[in-house]
Amino acid sequence: MKTVLIGVGQAGGKLATEIANFDAEMEFGAVTGALAVNSAKTDLRSLPLDTVLIGQDRVNGHGVGGDNELGAEVMQADSHEVVEALEGRITSEAEAIWVAAGLGGGTGSGGAPVLVKELSRIYSVPVYALGVLPGQGEGSMYQVNAGRSLKTLAREADATLLVDNDAWHSAGESVEEGFDAINKAIAQRFGLLLAAGEAVEGVGESVVDTSEVINTLRTGGIAALGYATAEAAPDAEENINVVMSTARRALLTGTSLPDATEAEAALLAIAGEPDRLSRKGVERARSWLEEELGCMQVRGGDFPLGSERVAALVLLGGVERSKRVEQFFERAKAAQQETDAIEEERESADSLFQNDQLDNLI
Ligand code: GDP
């Protein structure tokens, strides 16, 4: 999928960089352009991408803090600058635009939905979002921001691929310590997804192509990505079970949104050396996915890659009714109520201080 990537906010910029680097290192050529957008100058400085600084008249390059309403406002005011910077990059070969952002912060959280809406209005290619959900341990503000941002994104984007920050970090490290590792994991998995339709070697009927990725995402709403890998024998016949068990792990323990096992559509891509890929294994794994997900729209195919291991990528479309998403919205709602209660208390304390009677008492 020939893609133009736009990272909004700190996490978005870092992700766009990692994904573009992975694509270049692997020589996939799926990422045809990458851009980082932020209201904080310092966050842009360290990135090797072309950048756009928004909201200068409002925040003077200092960022919006965790204020995602301000993030949305500065994007609204300056999205034309992003569109200008994109000019010439969305060529006829571009098949999609992906906007990446951490949903719990300010600039990305507020800005990404506004930008997605604006780009959808202008361009005819699908505009997707790659959104990072705050981990459970992150504070209320992050959960509230992410809840609001996700609701709008899910409506405005052609699909929103979610990565839960709790999903791909190793045990024992905090989310913050794990950011670099998580970003690398996201870049590798998402990078493979973009490249899955780009395979040229060994092109045959069974090879996954970009239209299958697009059709899987066509259900709209929220999407998730699963991944697992395993050693493979040199002979495809011996790899029926390897393919099957790798696909199972990709769905059951390797998704970007743990426990997202209800989907409206899915795509299974089995990557590896064509000689090692068992057709029978792919077919069995595809049927298993159909049953497991309770969904009839499961596509499956090969992704020829020069690797002795096999990897399974499972793209799930339309997972918004899965437990994990519901739990997240409950978490965001509880955090919103908590924030409202604190705000109310503060307001009543303020009104006490403004009360004349109180002045008389002192
Ligand atoms: P912004 O610059 O105002 O858009 O804010 P951030 O991009 O820092 O967004 C904050 C949210 O993104 C929080 O939920 C963080 O956990 C998450 N986040 C920040 N940096 C990273 C990162 O490098 N990787 C990942 N995966 N998440 C991040």
Image (tube, grey):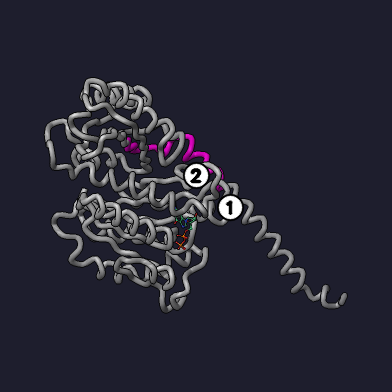
Q: Residue at x 47, y 47 (%)?
A: 165
The local secondary structure at tag 2 comes to: loop
Magenta stretch? Answer: 314-333
User: Which is closer to the viewer, label 2 or label 1?
Assistant: 2
Circle 1 SS class: helix
Residue at the extreme right: 361
- From the viewer's perspective, tell me whether residue 187 is left or right of residue 178: left
* Residue 124, placed above or below residue 55: above
Quadrant in the picture for the C terminus: bottom right
Report the number of discs.
Answer: 2
Decide if residue 213 is in sight here: yes
Residue linked to disc 1: 336
Residue at image position (51%, 67%) is 65
| Residue type marked 1 | Gln
Mark closest to the chain's N terminus, 2 or 1: 2
Residue 323: image x %, image y %?
Answer: 48, 35
